[in-house]
Image (spheres, helix red, strand yellow):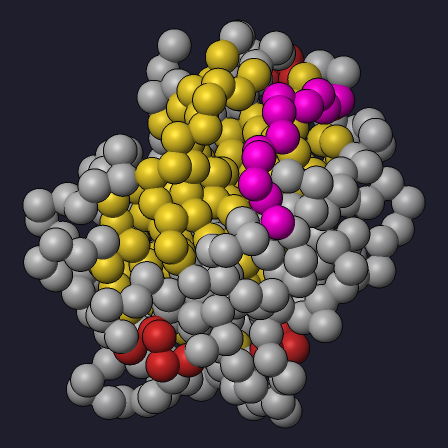
Amino acid sequence: MDRRTAPRAATLVAAVALLVGCSGEATDRGTSGSGTTTPGTPPSSSSGSAPTDVVTDLDAPWSITIDDETTLVSERDSGRVLELTDDGTREVGTVEAVSAGGEGGLLGLAVHDDHLYTYFTSADDNRVVRHELTGEPGSLGLGDAETILDGIPSASFHNGGRIAFGPDDMLYVTTGDAGETDRAQDPESLAGKILRLTPEGEVPEDNPFDDSLVWTLGHRNPQGIAWADDGTMYASEFGQDTWDELNVIEAGDNYGWPTVEGTADDDRFIDPVQQWSPDEASPSGIAIDDGSIWIANLRGERLREVPLDDVTTSTEHLVGEHGRLRDVAVATDGSLWVLTNNTDGRGDPGDGDDRILRVVVR
């Protein structure tokens, strides 16, 4: 069975029908500044139709990955991988060597060719480990762990952590600067980068730097990556005091941190296509569907929609309605599944938090 993640994620229609409607940070940045309005057209605001619960009572969830048969969720602090079933959730397994603390722990998930890839913080570093997925949907398990990349600098904050397979079947990994800003500009460091590697952890021959996993550099703490149908790659990134960013990612480019934050008009660096003040954003996971980029925001407590035909504009959904939003994925029925993040020690959890929400915005 091929569980490879596709650009348009899929879900079990039967599970959706059964689960929908049931109830089951200091912020991720430095101290926020005052900020100003993003130059350009101000965003409109829309809440769409009322979201419904897919599943509730998750514990500090971080990543949701959906393929044609299975939905998996990571729990940051417990190190558990959960599978959604007709009855709610079940534990697939616990990832060994996870050392949770601050923003670190079990973070990103990706599924590719019957393997689950995980990004997590250990006692010594951040690393990418894969497990064979055993069993069948509804009774999945984790095979032996195989470390395909280690030595990524870690800290109690700025760990990056999003992983995803691109349309080229290569694994992309976002890493933070782990609190030492100069790492982002150091081509020899794995921190403050977007990395590109083969499914086995090797350096692809067409990477932009010789014998290097580095795809792009100059990042502070990117936590979202996704691809449009034309192959364009986008990434969301936490700034520090002034601007959070949405960037178009191209091989070998430098995105400026820590020399610049946000739009700088400096020929040495790539400017973001859109930026927001920290109190309106803290962008984490992103997804692309139906002509738009969808961005889950933590401190901003909103789902932001950026149309691909004009990435300088945006529309806001669910503003302040469900607390911190960590990740978003796309279902084949056209809905979005949005992962809240109120139980990680930085939010204000309500009854049933954390949860996956089914959102229809059209």
Confirm whether residue 143 shows in the render. Answer: yes
Residue occupying the point 57% across, 35% down: 96
Q: Nearer the viewer, residue 6 or 208?
A: 208
Q: Position of residue 302 (x, y in %)?
A: 65, 61
Q: Position of residue 265 (x, y in %)?
A: 27, 89
Q: Position of residue 54 (x, y in %)?
A: 72, 31
Q: Nearer the viewer, residue 92 or 165?
A: 92
Q: Position of residue 45 (x, y in %)?
A: 63, 65
- State the image quarter where residue 53 is shown: top right
Magenta-drawn segment? 88-99
Residue occupying the point 34% across, 88% down: 259
Q: Nearer the viewer, residue 231 or 137?
A: 137
Confirm whether residue 3 shows in the render. Answer: no
Residue occupying the point 18% across, 46% down: 203
Q: Is residue 145 magenta?
A: no
Up-down relation of residue 107 to residue 23 (above or below): below
173 left or right of 15 in image: left
Q: Identify the residue at the far right of this view.
A: 351
Up-down relation of residue 348 to residue 22 (above or below): below
Residue occupying the point 36% across, 15% down: 2
Q: Identify the residue at the far front of this view.
A: 124
325 left or right of 273 in image: right
- State the image quarter where residue 169 is shown: top left
Up-down relation of residue 294 to residue 6 (above or below): below
